[in-house]
């Protein structure tokens, strides 16, 4: 076949390690190689995982698991019986290993052979990693190593500046490569530099039928010959949370951001001021209309409206994450209890076959146990259904968030000519020339169909997503119930004892009292650990729950109006205000947060380093005039038993009901310390104690 273009292709799939190298990577490499062959491109070099090594290098598939495998997934028995993926060896003909040394050798060869006007296409289907500093030095995952933006720039040095380099990158955080400083370089990218692509999201990770790389291939197979042409088609066809964009889009948005900072306005204000001056027939208006219709974003025609959509989707995401965490933790606790005692939890069997056999036997045992407890199984399935519903909502939310980011790029394109300086416009024009220059030879015309065959009817596009405004209603429908009380399980799990009525909660509005023993909820006897917590979560908000209560010698039925569960605190970091952080005072009193510095000291009765830290902690608090609050998520009774024998423990003790404060500060190791200033703003956060207190006290008197 006659070659119309001097094109060399570097096709890369590093994969990282065998268990992370998905089957989809192999399929993408194969269909891409077929695409290039069909277009007559013969100079294609594949860099695949470990190259020609005789060893497993990809996760080919998952083992077929029993029907009720969800009874183990995510629980304590899961890692002990998880057989892992089926690993296979792959040796593609002529493929080189996906290592930096092999890539450097190839690029040196290319530099010696490629001439001015030639094109090097670097096509990447792989994993990617973010910049640890939060900037744009993102990386491609090679086989056991990384290829950063700076590495790629250095390794392209052997190529003449007159050789065009086109990047087609579909890994997570690929947008870090979009603003490559090498001249005559451009490309298309699946995700902005601070955002993962679909391959990092479990719901899509192992699918080979979705994602930026596959959609780009389809665009080229459909007849596209230029990178910009294919990328614009993918804007409307990539049904994943990807945020596809071109180098020119990244440069344009960065240039507008610089202009906005110089003028003291927001990017949205700058774009919206320029929009009325742009022609109504600009081609990106039509793309925007198709995009927002396809993904249920309404009819936004301004950057302000796009920002409002993103803000609302962010609010939905926060609520969704809160309820997903609540349901997931409750289900995990229940599954851990269900599987307790079935297998030693210290180690598991070696070998996939043994693990798979163990998993099947464990599930049969769990099924037999649940067959005798149909009520327990029903509650487990209800919790699982709530989590599944939230997973579905998250899929829609993430799709619409990605589409809104695409829409923002389109609005920036429309206003480019009004907002850029002459030098910036020249750079943008150079990038667009690079993106619009021919890349692949034209597609050969298919042979005419026989006249006796019916002409196929074109299929319609994907069904548009529901409007994003409907997400709130679906999320609220999965909101757990809330009784508003603290409690502890009674011995033998024969009910729970009421330890406290939480301010503003429905229990405080009922006839419940501290010390009451709750034996049943709506006729469901509480005979298992965690049962009362499950009952509160599963009670529909707005309904009335009937509590069977023992008060002394009396048996009472007390109605309680179920409230929607308050949203748990979001993770807090340095510089954040603790706001409405609420902790229950063990003695009914806590120092007010605000007015003077406060140290939140996360501890437990069993934590030896916590006790060792106390002298240093007291001295630090006294030196800086700070209040000391000791925070624990242990039951009141356990704290009381500990204090009966403890000497000199801080009297300001807070009970962290349900561990919400612990989650908000992301406490993973005890002891943990949070230092607040007089306004309740977080100054320092630290964990652990080894001879010295890990607090500096910077900013305090």
Image (cartoon, grey):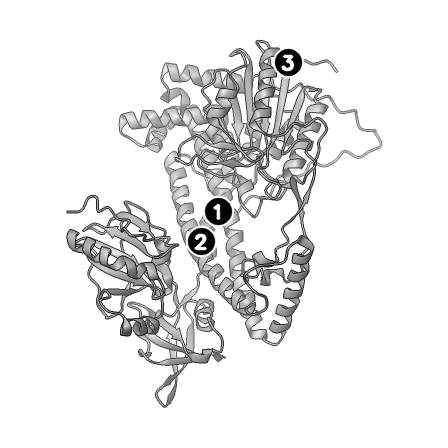
What's the residue at 61%, 55% (across, down)? 82
Q: Quadrant of residue 194?
A: top left
Q: CA distance from mark 3 to mark 1?
A: 43 Å
Q: Residues within 10 Å of mark 1 (few under 14, many from 20)?
A: many
Does the residue at mark 2 contact the one at mark 1 (Cβ under 8 Å)? yes
What's the residue at 64%, 53% (across, down)? 83
Q: CA distance from mark 3 to mark 2?
A: 51 Å
Which secondary structure, mark 3?
loop
Q: Which mark is residue 122?
A: none
Q: Earlier in the sequence, mark 2 or mark 1?
A: 2
Does the residue at mark 3 contact the one at mark 2 (Cβ under 8 Å)? no
Q: Residues within 10 Å of mark 3 (few under 14, many from 20)?
A: some
Q: CA distance from mark 2 to mark 1?
A: 10 Å
Q: Nearer the viewer, residue 24 or 51?
A: 51
Q: Residues within 10 Å of mark 2 (few under 14, many from 20)?
A: many
Left or right of 344: which side holds 133? Answer: left
- In the displayed structure, 226 sits above or below 399; it is above
What's the residue at 46%, 33% (across, down)? 192
Q: Which mark is residue 397?
A: 1
Q: In this view of the protein, can residue 189 be seen by the observer? A: yes
- Label 3 or label 1, whichever lies nearer to me, is 3
Which residue is the site of mark 3? 6
Which secondary structure, mark 1?
helix
Query: Hey, which residue is sitting farthest bottom in the picture?
Result: 553
Whole-percent x, y for residue 457 in the image: 72, 37
Q: Earlier in the sequence, mark 3 or mark 1?
A: 3
Q: Nearer the viewer, residue 216 or 347?
A: 347
- In the displayed structure, 507 sits above or below 622; it is below
Whole-percent x, y for residue 159 in the image: 54, 14
Q: In this view of the protein, can residue 521 be seen by the observer? A: no
Q: Which mark is residue 320?
A: 2
């Amino acid at each position: 076949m006659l070659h119309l273009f001097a094109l060399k292709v570097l096709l890369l799939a590093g994969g990282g390690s065998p268990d992370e190298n998905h089957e989809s990577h192999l399929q993408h490499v194969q269909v891409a190689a077929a695409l290039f062959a069909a277009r007559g491109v013969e100079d294609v070099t594949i860099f695949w995982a470990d190259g020609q090594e005789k060893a497993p290098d990809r996760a080919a598939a998952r083992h077929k698991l029993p029907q009720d495998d969800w009874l183990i997934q995510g629980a304590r028995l899961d890692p002990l019986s998880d057989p892992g993926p089926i690993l296979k060896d792959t040796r593609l003909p002529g493929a080189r290993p996906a290592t930096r040394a092999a890539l450097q050798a190839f690029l040196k060869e290319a530099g010696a052979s490629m001439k001015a006007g030639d094109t090097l296409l670097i096509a990447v289907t792989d994993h990617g990693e973010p910049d640890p500093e939060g900037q744009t030095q993102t990386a491609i995952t090679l086989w056991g190593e990384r290829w950063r933006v700076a590495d790629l720039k250095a390794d392209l040095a052997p190529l003449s500046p007159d050789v065009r380099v086109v990047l087609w990158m579909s890994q997570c955080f690929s947008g870090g490569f979009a603003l490559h400083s090498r001249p005559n370089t451009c490309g298309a990218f699946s995700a902005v530099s601070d955002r993962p692509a679909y391959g990092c999201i479990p719901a899509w990770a192992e699918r080979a039928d979705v994602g930026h790389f596959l959609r780009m291939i389809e665009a080229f197979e459909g007849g596209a010959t230029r990178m910009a042409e294919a990328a614009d088609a993918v804007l409307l066809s990539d049904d994943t949370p990807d945020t596809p964009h071109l180098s020119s889009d990244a440069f344009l948005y960065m240039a507008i951001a610089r202009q906005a900072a110089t003028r003291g306005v927001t990017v949205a204000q700058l774009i919206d001021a320029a929009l009325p001056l742009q022609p109504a027939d600009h081609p990106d208006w039509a793309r925007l209309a198709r995009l927002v219709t396809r993904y249920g974003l309404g009819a936004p025609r301004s950057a302000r409206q796009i920002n409002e959509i993103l803000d609302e989707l962010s609010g939905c995401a926060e609520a969704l994450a809160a309820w997903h965490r609540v349901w997931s933790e409750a289900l995990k606790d229940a599954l851990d209890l269900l599987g307790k005692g079935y297998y030693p939890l210290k180690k598991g069997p070696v070998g996939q076959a043994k693990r798979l056999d163990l998993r099947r036997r464990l599930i049969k045992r769990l099924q037999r146990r649940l067959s005798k407890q149909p009520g327990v199984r029903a509650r487990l399935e209800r919790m699982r259904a709530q989590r599944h519903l939230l997973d579905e909502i998250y899929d829609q939310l993430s799709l619409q968030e990605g589409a809104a980011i695409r829409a923002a790029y389109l609005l920036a394109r429309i206003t480019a000519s009004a907002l850029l300086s002459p030098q910036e416009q020249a750079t943008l024009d150079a990038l667009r020339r690079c993106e619009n220059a021919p890349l692949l030879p034209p597609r050969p015309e298919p042979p005419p169909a026989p006249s006796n065959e019916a002409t196929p009817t074109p299929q319609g596009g994907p069904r548009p997503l529901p409007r994003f405004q409907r997400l709130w209603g679906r999320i609220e429908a999965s909101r757990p119930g809330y009784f508003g009380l603290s409690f502890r399980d009674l011995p033998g799990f024969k009910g729970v004892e009421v330890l406290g009525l939480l301010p503003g909660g429905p229990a405080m509005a009922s006839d419940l009292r501290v010390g009451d023993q709750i034996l049943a909820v709506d006729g469901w006897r509480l005979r298992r650990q965690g049962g009362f917590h499950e009952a509160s979560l599963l009670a529909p908000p707005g309904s009335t729950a009937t509590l069977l209560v023992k008060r002394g010698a009396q048996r009472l039925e007390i109605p309680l109006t179920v409230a929607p569960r308050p949203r748990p605190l979001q993770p807090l970091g340095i510089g954040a205000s603790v706001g409405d952080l609420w902790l229950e005072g063990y003695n009914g009193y806590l120092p007010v947060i605000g007015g003077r510095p406060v140290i939140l000291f996360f501890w437990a009765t069993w934590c030896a380093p916590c006790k060792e830290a106390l002298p240093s902690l007291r001295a630090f608090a006294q030196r800086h005039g700070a209040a000391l609050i000791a925070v624990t998520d242990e039951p009141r009774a356990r704290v009381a038993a500990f204090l009966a024998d403890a000497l000199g423990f801080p009297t300001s003790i807070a009970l962290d009901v349900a561990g919400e404060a612990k989650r908000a500060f992301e406490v993973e190791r005890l002891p943990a310390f949070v230092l607040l200033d007089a306004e309740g703003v977080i100054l320092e956060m630290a964990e652990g104690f080894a001879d010295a207190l890990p607090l500096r006290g910077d900013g305090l008197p």
